[in-house]
Amino acid sequence: MVMNVKNVLINNGYEVILNNEFASSASGGLAPFDTWPEVWLLKDSDLDGAKKVLALIDTELNPITWKCVDCNEENDQTFDFCWKCSRENIQ
């Protein structure tokens, strides 16, 4: 997904870099979120325009979710149980 975002932004004229591209091999010694790849814009002034470009592919970026019947928390479609209250997905 990160490579897709990077390519979409580059193809729309934005200058970006990919941070933590090869950090996944260090995930045993670091917290997992410290090794996740990230797309960084090189110019802060490009942020609003880049958001508009990415909104066009928003459905691909946002996974389908389900809402917990107990606590109303939205959960990723891959979760069988609510991450907040542990209620089983009955949908």
Image (cartoon, grey):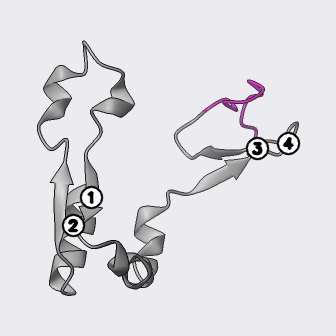
**Residue that appears at 17% across and 54% down:** 18
In the image, the segment drawn in magenta is: 80-91
Local crowd at mark 2 within 10 Å, few (<14), some, or many (≥20)?
some
Foreground disc of the pair 2, 3: 2
Considering only order in the chain, which callout, 2 or 4, is on the residue closer to the N terminus?
A: 2
Residue 80 falls in which quadrant of the image? top right
Q: What is the distance, in whole Å, between disc 4 and disc 3 at their CAs?
A: 8 Å
Considering only order in the chain, which callout, 3 or 2, is on the residue closer to the N terminus?
A: 2
Considering only order in the chain, which callout, 3 or 1, is on the residue closer to the N terminus?
A: 1
Towards the viewer: 67 or 43: 43
Q: Where is residue 17? Give x, y as percent.
A: 16, 60
Above/below status of 10 relative to 28: below
The numbered disc on residue 88 is none
Q: What is the distance, in whole Å, between disc 1 and disc 3 at their CAs?
A: 27 Å
**Residue that appears at 43% across and 77% down:** 51
Q: Which residue is mark 2?
A: 6
Seen in the image, is 60 located left or right of residue 7?
A: right
Q: Which residue is mark 4?
A: 69
Above/below status of 60 relative to 22: below
The numbered disc on residue 73 is 3
**Residue that appears at 88% across and 36% down:** 70
Q: Where is residue 8? Give x, y as percent.
A: 23, 76
Towards the viewer: 49 or 61: 49
Q: Secondary structure at mark 4?
A: loop
